[in-house]
Image (spheres, coloured by chain):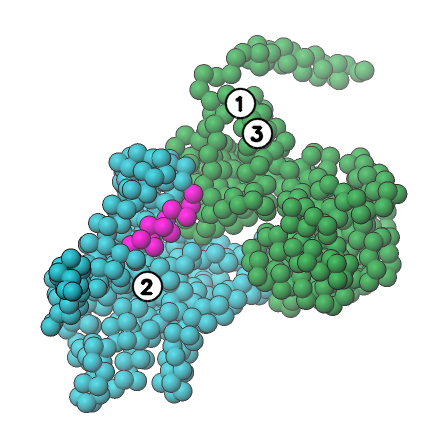
Amino acid sequence: MNHRKLALATLGGAALLASTPLMGAPPAAAPIKIGYVYVSPVGDAGWTFQHDQGRKQMEAALQGAVTTKFIENVPEGADAERIIRQLAQDGNQIIFTTSFGYMNQTAKVAAAFPNAIFLHATGYKQGKNLGTYNARFYEGRYLNGVIAGKMTKTNIAGYVGAFPIPEVMQGINAFTRGMKSVNPKAEVRVIWVNSWFDPGKEREAAMTLISQGADMITHHTDSTAAVQAAEEKHKEKGTWAFSYHSDMAKYGPTAQLTGTTHIWGDFYTKVVKEVLDKKWKGTHVWGGFKDGMIKLAPLSPAIPADLKKTILRMEADITAGRLHPFAGPVVDQDGKERVPKGQNMTDADMGAMNYYVQGVASTLPKS
Amino acid sequence: MWLKFEPRAEPSRAMAYLSPLLAVGLMFLCGMILFYILGKNPVEGFRVFFMNPVKDAYGVAELFLKATPLMLCAVGLSMGFKANVWNIGAEGQLLIGALAGGGLALHFEGSPSPFLLPAMILAGALGGMAWAAIPAFLRTRFNANEILTSLMLVYVAELMVSWVVHGPWKDPDGFNFPQTRLFGAEATLPILLEGTRVNAALIFALGALVAGWIFMNRSFMGYQMKVAGQAEHAGRYAGFSAKRSVWIGMLAGGAMAGIAGISEVAGPIGQITEHISPGYGFAAMIVAFVGRLNPIGIFFSSLLMALLYLGGEQAQQYLNLPSSISKVFQGMLLFFLLGSDVFIHFRPRLVRRRK
């Protein structure tokens, strides 16, 4: 250890000692108030449901230190700003706004309330008291794709998408790459329903994909309709499903093989603790398996034992950073090399993904 | 004894004005009963729902901000409704107005011209009118029912908004998210009261109320439209053009909805996204009828409707009620209004049942 490092270590140690009495002190008399803004009603599955599960988990973990409240079904237009401001005005010290469409409103209110901390899910604007967070859902998608590639009989997977924003593109491409990695003949077909939540259209899209020969169905929409459609066709066509957002085994008890489940509770607990301990720094958190922010839904008994083992090993590899769903070469649909061999795609490039990779049979809607 | 409804010889003018007040009173009453059933203190519930939102100047400003697009859409729609022209598509006209005016804002980004904002408002009005002209044309040329065509065009307009924000007008620095760039200060409506979000759109709305009142009550054309609405045959006999009523009714609704749309994107939102309106064009129909299709009535009913939205937010925050509470109140209001309106044409009487 050279002198500089030693000096730093001593300094760090001193800082730790100095802060110890603070950390050891009993929690402040009044619990701090935390507010959540949800884009849809909580319901019993989907994006908002998972955030609410996270809120509950955090509140239970930090019992006595926090109280939480949520406001659901908040439109992403002009109304959001008022609601976020009211939460701040009402003394909420941490405010989570859980949809992309709240970005500018959250930023405006954050500037007006410098003493509160704002955390905006899936956005890209940060500030002194404004952090952002999101999860690497694509890691789970890749593993779903591997299972699909191994178990498909028709070599076709069907994907019901909401809107071609980067997060959805990452999912489709990761699933496709996973599927292709074990099955070169595999192809993925995508139908866009232009809505985050429209059970009727989602079902129709899933049924269309099934009739086109897809025996693996997944979705990036908020309802359980796609999984239910697969369940309905399971006997006749041997259709399997991968759930998204929530574990939807309740809706596809036979057909659901696994899924990519959002887990926000650990993150919420961690970030609120950081705020309580005055250690929070405004930043972007983008966590995956490693951070416990996503999990695979329970693996169905229909998955062969050796495949299960492979999947668990791959999950460990992704967690350890040995496997990256977008490890080069990444070639897009038009044959253009997006990431050369030997490199992993950068977070920035993933964040701006607007193309299909090779293996997706559909083409993107022209803009 | 049973209740009998006797037709009145003449519609009751008193009831026409009392009926909305009766509906509001019944809504309050049933709302408080509802709070009680849900295990909340009804007085406390009333206070949180109807008084909390306007407890300070900021709250009052938010009320006017929320009421502005409702006022604009409702006064435009009421002109058509008076003439039995059923424009159900104000929501779509609002969106196209937002696109037309917002398109100018994006195209002339950073322009120092003082005419940019007025041009955007004008473009908003023209955009809304263009969208309303389609059902008007189909109605006058092919006698296609404007209820259906105007409603269907709402969905087309929604998809157009979706297309531009995912496609040609997408913010190049926005990481592919479906939104345009934020409008510059030159393309944003001025704030009327520092520290609030109330902007010049409120002045447009109040101006529209006045203009609507003058048109319907002081102009010959407005008179013709009223006659056409109340007695179509009489209107035709007098030589009033039914087609012109359709055109004016639809275009007035489209223009106002279009201004509401551009005012939202150039006002509190500040960019075009997929979430411009949480259904103002539809809610405005309730506003128009609760306001008796009368601009003065619409002024108050749009404030009431805005209060129901704001109250619902408060009820979630302080009473732990679900977001649908706003919709329950809106539904009750419309339900009681339709119920009370029976008394305009009918007189209730208790009669003895005869053997």
Vertical position of residue A276 compared to residue A198: above or below: above
**Which residue is identified by label 1?**
A63
Query: Neighbour class for label 2 at 10 Å: few (<14), some, many (≥20)?
Result: many
Q: B302 or A222, which lies in front?
A: A222
Q: A312 or B56, which lies in front?
A: A312
Instruction: Specify start and end residues of the magenta stretch as a single range.
Output: B322-333
Disc 2 is attached to a residue of which chain? B
Q: Give the x, y percent position of residue A357.
A: 77, 58
Q: Amino acid at mark 2?
A: Met
Q: Which mark is residue A185?
A: none
Disc 1 is attached to a residue of which chain? A
Q: Are marks 1 and 2 on the same chain?
A: no
Tell me, what hue is chain B? cyan
Vertical position of residue A186 compared to residue A310: above or below: below
**Which residue is identified by label 2?**
B285
Q: Amino acid at mark 3?
A: Met
Quadrant assignment, res B211: bottom left
- Please tell me which residue is depicted at 55% across the width and 38% down the height of the picture: A52
| Left or right relative to A254: residue A310 | right
Q: Amino acid at mark 1?
A: Gln
| Left or right relative to B14: residue B229 | right
- Please tell me which residue is depicted at 47% across the width and 44% down the height of the picture: A72
Q: Secondary structure at mark 2?
A: helix
- Please tell me which residue is depicted at 13% across the width and 60% down the height of the picture: B352
Please give the letter of the chain rendered in green.
Answer: A
**Which residue is identified by label 3?**
A58
* Marks 2 & 3, CB-CB < 8 Å contact: no
Q: Are marks 1 and 3 on the same chain?
A: yes
Secondary structure, magenta segment, majority class: helix
